[in-house]
């Protein structure tokens, strides 16, 4: 990790009890980020929960006005509402904000979506330039935005005529409540009982849906729009913009996706796979099985099956892939921090 010489940083994680917050803490430790102290923050209802950080026992603290005092980095991995209320406070306290919820980008045009793994391929220096100095605000891309932008970046030199991607989100994208609802629905359906659906307001177990019920606080259409907005903002004309669709799946973890692209002229499948590999995407070998949301658990990279030509459309290809949604998003956020620690590009 490109840390400064011997310098240690005080870190605050907001939403520490969330699935993404827990994953973020683990990735910081796994990548040996130079942290002198990690402050775990969350809503008052979970304050006092015993946990650990860097092998030491600690407690989750209630999120308060002075929570960010002396913190150099403030990661927001909980609810968008918490991030919206508190990222300006963290910034005023002198912390560099890295927001994983999308709230900062929605309210601050200077908070540009950051994907360090694609900066070189797309000839961007935005993640470092955008406030590499004190009190900067960075919006770390979500897992689906990283996937869509990676597909676009890999195909950018192949005369892309059209591209589309269907994303299959897991219920863990809706947090612990989403996981518990799928567990409950599965058990109820197998026992011929009425299902509970407070999160999705729809049957998710043993089902695929393109919309949540009217009573759901989150709308799949809004999530799709947010992903599309972030992808367009990040690519910024540097690669062909893909059409994006979401289909909710009855799986707990792991984002799967199917992408289609059509080119103006023939493109070699080996060349396209090499373009993905250059972006640190893991492409299956000839005899390897295709990735699944189960096989990518715990992996930090996007995994692809061998790319296939469409049987009917000349110069059309299909791409199947999967990624650990929590690990991918958390690793991206930590890489943003690593880029900042390394110092601004000249």
Image (tube, rainbow, N blue to C red):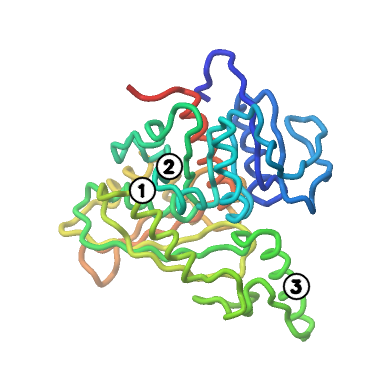
Q: Which mark is residue 184?
A: 3
Among numbered discs 3 and 1, the one appearing first in the sequence: 3
Indicate the quadrant where residue 249 lies.
bottom right
Residue occupied by mark 1: 234
Asked if labels 1 and 3 touch by Cβ distance under 8 angstroms, the answer is no
Indicate the quadrant where residue 208 lies.
bottom right
The image shows residue 69 at horizontal and vertical percentages of 66, 30
Asked if labels 3 and 2 touch by Cβ distance under 8 angstroms, the answer is no
Among numbered discs 2 and 3, the one appearing first in the sequence: 2
Indicate left or right for 105 with 213 as reference: left
Residue occupied by mark 2: 115
Q: Residues within 10 Å of mark 2 (few under 14, many from 20)?
A: many
Asked if labels 1 and 2 touch by Cβ distance under 8 angstroms, the answer is yes
The image shows residue 155 at horizontal and vertical percentages of 28, 51
The image shows residue 72 at horizontal and vertical percentages of 59, 28
Which residue is drawn at the image coordinates 64% and 62% (left, top)?
Answer: 252
Q: Is residue 19 above or below residue 26?
A: below
Q: Residues within 10 Å of mark 3 (few under 14, many from 20)?
A: some
Q: CA distance from mark 2 to mark 3?
A: 36 Å
Q: Give the SS element for disc 3.
A: helix
Residue 191 seen from this side? yes
Which residue is drawn at the image coordinates 56% and 51% (left, top)?
Answer: 84
Residue 296 seen from this side? no
The image shows residue 96 at horizontal and vertical percentages of 53, 33
Indicate the quadrant where residue 228 lies.
bottom left
Which residue is drawn at the image coordinates 69% and 70% (left, top)?
Answer: 182
Indicate which label's residue lies in the foreground, 3 or 1: 1
Q: Which mark is residue 191?
A: none
Q: Is residue 334 above or below residue 35?
A: below
Looking at the rendered image, the quarter that the C terminus falls into is: top left
């Amino acid at each position: 990790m490109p840390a400064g010489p011997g310098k240690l940083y005080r870190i605050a994680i907001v939403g520490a009890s969330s699935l993404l917050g827990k994953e973020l803490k683990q990735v910081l430790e796994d990548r040996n980020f130079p942290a002198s102290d990690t402050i775990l923050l969350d809503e008052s209802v979970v304050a006092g929960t015993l946990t650990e950080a860097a092998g030491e026992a600690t407690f989750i603290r209630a999120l308060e006005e002075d929570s960010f005092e002396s913190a150099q980095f403030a990661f927001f991995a909980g609810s968008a509402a918490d991030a919206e209320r508190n990222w300006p406070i963290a910034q005023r306290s002198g912390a560099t904000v890295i927001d994983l919820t999308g709230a900062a980008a929605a309210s601050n045009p200077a908070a540009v979506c950051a994907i360090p793994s694609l900066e070189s391929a797309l000839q961007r220096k935005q993640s470092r330039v955008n406030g590499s100095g004190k009190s900067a605000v960075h919006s770390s891309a979500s897992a689906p935005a990283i996937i869509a932008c990676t597909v676009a970046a890999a195909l950018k030199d192949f005369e892309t005529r059209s591209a589309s991607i269907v994303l299959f989100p897991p219920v863990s994208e809706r947090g612990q409540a989403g996981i518990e609802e799928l567990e409950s629905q599965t058990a109820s359906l197998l026992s011929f009982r009425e299902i509970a659906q407070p999160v999705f307001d729809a049957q998710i177990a043993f089902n695929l849906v393109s919309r949540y019920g009217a009573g759901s606080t989150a709308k799949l259409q809004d999530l799709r729009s947010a992903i599309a907005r972030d992808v367009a903002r990040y690519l910024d004309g540097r690669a062909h913009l893909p059409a994006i669709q979401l289909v909710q799946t009855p799986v707990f973890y792991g984002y799967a996706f199917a992408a289609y692209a059509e080119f103006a002229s023939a493109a070699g499948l080996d060349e396209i796979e090499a373009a993905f590999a250059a972006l640190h995407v893991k492409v299956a070998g000839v005899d390897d099985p295709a990735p699944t949301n189960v096989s990518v658990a715990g992996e930090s990279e996007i995994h692809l099956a061998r790319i296939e030509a469409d049987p009917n459309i000349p110069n059309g290809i299909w791409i199947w892939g999967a990624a650990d949604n929590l690990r991918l998003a958390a690793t991206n956020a930590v890489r943003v921090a690593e880029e900042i620690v390394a110092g601004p590009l000249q």
